[in-house]
Image (cartoon, helix red, strand yellow):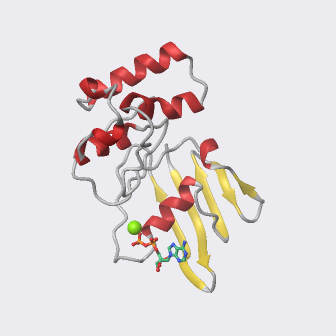
Amino acid sequence: MSVQVRQMVKSFGAFRAIDDLSVTFQSGKISVLLGASGCGKTTTLRCIAGLENPNGGEIRIEDEPVFSSARGIDLPPEKRRLGMVFQSYAVWPHLTVKGNVGMPLRAQNVPKEQIERRVQETLAIVGLSEQAEKSAMKLSGGQQQRVSIVFHRTGPTPKDEALQWSGWAVVR
Ligand SMILES: Nc1ncnc2c1ncn2[C@@H]1O[C@H](COP(=O)(O)OP(=O)(O)O)[C@@H](O)[C@H]1O
Ligand SMILES: [Mg+2]
């Protein structure tokens, strides 16, 4: 799944955090945004995910515009079919490990048996099967990171900040 950003601008008040950014993230490749602290990496990912509203430009996912200032398009995050792993784990504290990992699938109204199967498969990949029924807050930092990574997606998964854990999985 490719992501194209064209002439994106994002300001916070008078401060221009992103100034005319154009970049293509190619399908099947791992891309890294590298730059000094405060240069706009997180803001870029948040704009792609639909968590920030750019002031101008266009964002396409698989060639479909998900944001376009010129055409008045702004798809909400849940319609963009991608996920974001936050710098902090963003694990839901009131849910079990299984509850966390299955949540996006529930949001997409995937049938219950399918959710169960996909959650179990994914937890096995990241070695968390034993922890499935535990509260996510009871996990170690590294385990929480894995939960947040498999808190999955049907598309590319922008990750903010390098993660200590070198593997990751996608639930399709
Ligand atoms: N919600 C916000 N309100 C005001 N300024 C912000 C906001 N979010 C980010 N910024 C500013 O935008 C710039 C880019 O921030 P960010 O994208 O978080 O940088 P980084 O490259 O370190 O991830 C920084 O100067 C930051 O202070
Ligand atoms: Mg950042």
Quadrant where the C terminus lies? top left
Residue 70: name its quadrant.
Answer: bottom right
Farthest residue to the top: give it.
Answer: 113
163 with respect to 108 (left or right)? left
Can you give x and y, in whole percent of width and height, for residue 75 in the image? 68, 50
Farthest residue to the bottom: give it.
Answer: 14
Q: How many marks?
A: 0
- Residue at figure coordinates x 57%, y 48% from the top left: 61
Can you give x and y, in whole percent of width and height, for residue 64 in the image? 64, 47
Viewer-proximal residue, 116 or 6?
Answer: 116
- Residue at figure coordinates x 34%, y 25% from the top left: 133
Viewer-proximal residue, 143 or 94?
Answer: 94
Residue 38: name its quadrant.
Answer: bottom left
Viewer-proximal residue, 22 or 32?
Answer: 32
Q: Is residue 16 above or below residue 55?
A: below
- Residue at figure coordinates x 61%, y 25% from the top left: 109
Can you give x and y, in whole percent of width and height, for residue 150 in the image? 37, 37
Can you give x and y, in whole percent of width and height, for residue 127 in the image? 23, 29
Q: Is residue 89 above or below residue 114?
A: below
Q: In this view, does 143 lie above or below 65?
A: above
163 with respect to 117 (left or right)? left
- Residue at figure coordinates x 37%, y 58% from the top left: 87
Q: In this view, does 137 lie above or below 52?
A: above
